[in-house]
Image: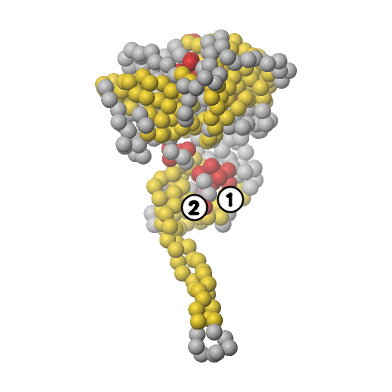
Amino acid sequence: MTVFLTLFFCGSSCAQSYFNLTSTRDYYSIRFKLVSNLIVIPVEINGVELSFILDTGVNKPILFDLTSADSLELKNTEAIYIRGLGGGEAIKAYKARSNIFRIKKDVVNYNEDIYLILDQGINFSPRLGVPIHGIIGFELFRDFVVEINYARKRIRFYRPGSYKYRACRKCQTFPLDIIHDKPYIKATVDLNEQKDLEVKLLIDSGSSDALWLFRKEKENLVTPENHFEDFLGRGLSGSIYGDRARVEKLQIGQFELKEAKVAFPDSVSIQHLQNLNERDGSLGAEVLKRFNIVFDYGEGKLTLRRNRYFKQPFKYNMSGIELQHNGIRVVKELESGIRRGKTNESPGEGVEIRLDRFFKYSLHPAFEIAEIRDGSPAFIAGLQRGDIILTVNGKATYRRSLHEVKEMLNEKPGKKIRLKVEREGQHLDFTFALKKVL
């Protein structure tokens, strides 16, 4: 599963601004898209509608893809430098003040700051297969009680004090710590035959992974012997690498998740993170999506109720291929049609029917291998980064979404996969079998 995870730290003082409901109702409801476990919502900035990831791990909105939003007008800008996950250097950004943010009709902030990144390398749309222009988080959770129904893909923003907690046998409410504008929860893990290790986790809805832990030998948080090295994702400061494994059990109150995926990022990737001593890792969206959740920052509460995703198995990428969109390609298709006409050759048969065959050319996204895991079935078969996947088991990829193609490459252990790819203008065939990881 491709990971999307970024953390942001203010490069200058962050001015206070607030979201409000413009109507007299107690709440406003919107639908969202669930893409690689991430919540994507429409956000209108200064009259231009964009797509943002709802990220509990970010304290100010960040805009990083202007390719389809070049008409957006930003005023009162100043240059700053920011850091995030990854081993790279700080990157230049521009802070723009006094912007109007609107989510659909009723959720509005008339004086919002935003941080604009012009680095074209910071673009998560290709990996997710849908346009993503930025991330937004803390202020929405601070200014409302936020109810997220992952099963129905719906969010409700409640006025503070208006949310009514109902008796619910299948729910559990937890204390929620807000530290430096980010939410934390306590859980336990069974790891390396150590039982009930208590961990404090950042709740990070902007990570599509399940669980991250930081190596701390004194607390018995060490990588299991059964693990593999992998590319974990892309942060604001570059690529993130580390080890992947499984915990025997992840326990959040009454909720028990067995054989959950866990990643241990390397020290270079997290070197710029502040307050590392205040937490042991992150709880990502592959766990969060298994619940319907109520975030109540004002009261310091988090309520969980498991949903239909709860019992889904935690699957690692069995092919070893990470895909992304990379431009478009021309597809040549053979089509046929019926053409009717009249003929004078036979008075009794005045209609002529012809079956025409012709080619149609159309443009479709190119699905490119962005990363390939060393030692994986695809790697052993000879596939390479940059290969464009044309067909999977005889089925053309251009008729499918990025998510659908990923699922075709990750169905079940032992599944035989036949790929036709384009490499440097040549069409090549490869065959391998999916193999369960760990």
Please give the label number shown on residue 336: none
Under tag 1, what secondary structure? strand
Residue labelled with disc 1: 417
The residue at the far front in this view is: 24
Left or right of 363 on screen, residue 158: right
Q: How far apart are marks 1 and 2 (CA)?
A: 17 Å
Left or right of 162 on screen, residue 384: left
Q: Is residue 55 above or below residue 198?
A: below
Q: Where is residue 220 in the image (x, y as percent from the top left)?
A: 58, 14
- Amino acid residing under circle 1: Ile
- Amino acid residing under circle 2: Tyr
Sequence-earlier tag: 1 or 2: 2
The residue at the far bottom in this view is: 346
Contact between labelled residues 2 and 1, with CB atoms less than 8 Å apart: no
The residue at the far right in this view is: 169
Q: How crowded is mark 2: few (under 14 residues within 10 Å), some or many (20 or more)?
A: many
Please give the label number shown on residue 398: 2
Camera sees residue 74:
yes
Q: Which of marks 1 and 2 is in front?
A: 2
Camera sees residue 431:
no
Image colouring: secondary structure
Residue shown at 58%/14% (left/top)? Answer: 162
Residue shown at 53%/16% (left/top)? Answer: 159
Residue shown at 34%/23% (left/top)? Answer: 99
Q: Residues within 10 Å of mark 1 (few under 14, many from 20)?
A: many
